[in-house]
Amino acid sequence: MADLVVPQLGESITEAVVAKWLKQVGETVAIDEPLLDLETDKITVQLPSPVAGALTEQRVAIGSTVKVGQVVGAVTAGAAGTAKATPVAAAPVAPAPVAAAPVAAKAVAAAPAPAPAPAANDLNKDALLKLTPSQRMVARENGALPSAATAARAAAPSAPVVIDPRDEVIAMSPLRKRIAERLVQAQQETASLTTFNEVDMTAVMDLRARYKDTFEKSNGVKLGFMSFFAKACVAAAKAYPGINAEVVGSSVVYKKHYDFGIAVSTPKGLVVPVLRDVDSLSFAGIEKGINALADKARTGKLAIEDLIGGTFSITNGGIYGSMMSTPLLNFPQTGILGMHNIVKRAVVVGEEIKIRPMMYVALTYDHRVVDGREAVSFLVAVKDRLESPDRMLLEA
């Protein structure tokens, strides 16, 4: 019998949540066939079967928090599948919504008083389930529950005090929690500021229209807008290096490599996988790299290595219809470019008023490293290259 062990999940990640069992006890499995999904605060990892045989044990239920190195189940090599299942202990889950008692108006229910802490030597299941995962680990190691005050805090409900029976309360996933933490961190630890400009997309759109069929036939990938923006940002970052930097302690690290995070929306939230060495990639290489990362993100196959080490980020709210926004920094980076939708507007060209496809672009930057002149100049450099894309082909 082979144990299913939670593998190393990446730097700084020590635990995960069992999101889904892909096989049930008694079912036949092939070697390396995925058996369950483990959701971390960054990615979803599939745990494969170490041998061919049958899944004979599930030690944890969906929703359980598990540690790296923990045994979560077992597969018996060569065993034929059976229909019999072994019960699994219920996982500690967030409290379900409770309907409020009928009232004349929307009143606020009083928070229930914390339950008294169990006796220190009473390591019963109910008491343990009231603790956080880290507290449970300490309790098992010490053979005793935490102090009365700590236990009382652990037992306090985390659900909203006011619960309308028409509402639904769902605990945040580890990924959503991590996104929230990073966004708050970016707001608290940086001096972020946003500057705007607008880009006439006529030249880029004409170029795409002329060469899109040939490009796709030659490279097996469509020519999108992102490759133009990525190329323009590389050129601008080389001229204004503070945008491609990071604050470390009391120093500024100016990155001499251009690894761009490309924001991708997935059913579980926004992730920003990193496209490496953008400066050395062709337009086709950029489009292929972005497509590969987006596919991995949407199918839950991103690795930790795909998400770390970015030096600058690009996000495209335009695909959802956004006209203008202020993107938040992808901490600890010092710059992020926001793309938006393309709208035909009347603009002055020379001495004439013409209808042109226009896009608002936004650059959010860390004012601790980048001053206003540098930020505005960076965005103008991006604009100039997009309005004259032949400059990027000539690397001018």
Image (tube, helix red, strand yellow):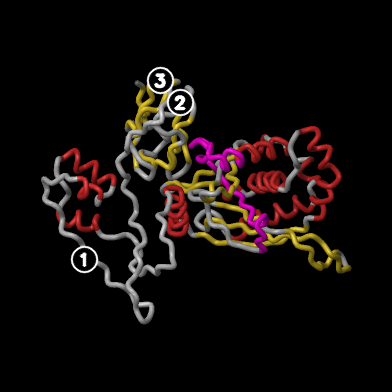
Pick the quarter of the image with the N terminus: top left
Q: Does residue 63 belong to the magenta stretch?
A: no
To which residue does mark 3 refer?
Answer: 79
**Type of amino acid at the residue the image marks with label 2:** Thr
Q: Mark 2 Cα within 10 Å, few/some/many (few <14, many 20+)?
A: many
Q: CA distance from mark 3 to mark 2?
A: 8 Å
Report if residue 377 is visible in the image. no
To which residue does mark 2 refer?
Answer: 28
* Residue 393 position within the rendered picture, expressed as x and y whole percent measured from the top left: 78, 41
Q: Nearer the viewer, mark 2 or mark 1?
A: 2
Point 36% across, 38% down: residue? 14
Magenta span of residues: 294-323
**Type of amino acid at the residue the image marks with label 3:** Ala
Residue at the farthest right position: 352
The local secondary structure at tag 2 comes to: strand
* Residue 180 position within the rendered picture, expressed as x and y whole percent measured from the top left: 45, 55
Q: CA distance from mark 3 to mark 1?
A: 52 Å
The mark nearer the N terminus, 3 or 2, is: 2
Along the line of sight, the residue nearer the viewer: 252 or 47: 47
As drawn, is 112 to the left or to the right of 230?
A: left
In this picture, is 369 found above or below 302? Answer: below
**Type of amino acid at the residue the image marks with label 1:** Ala
To which residue does mark 1 refer?
Answer: 113
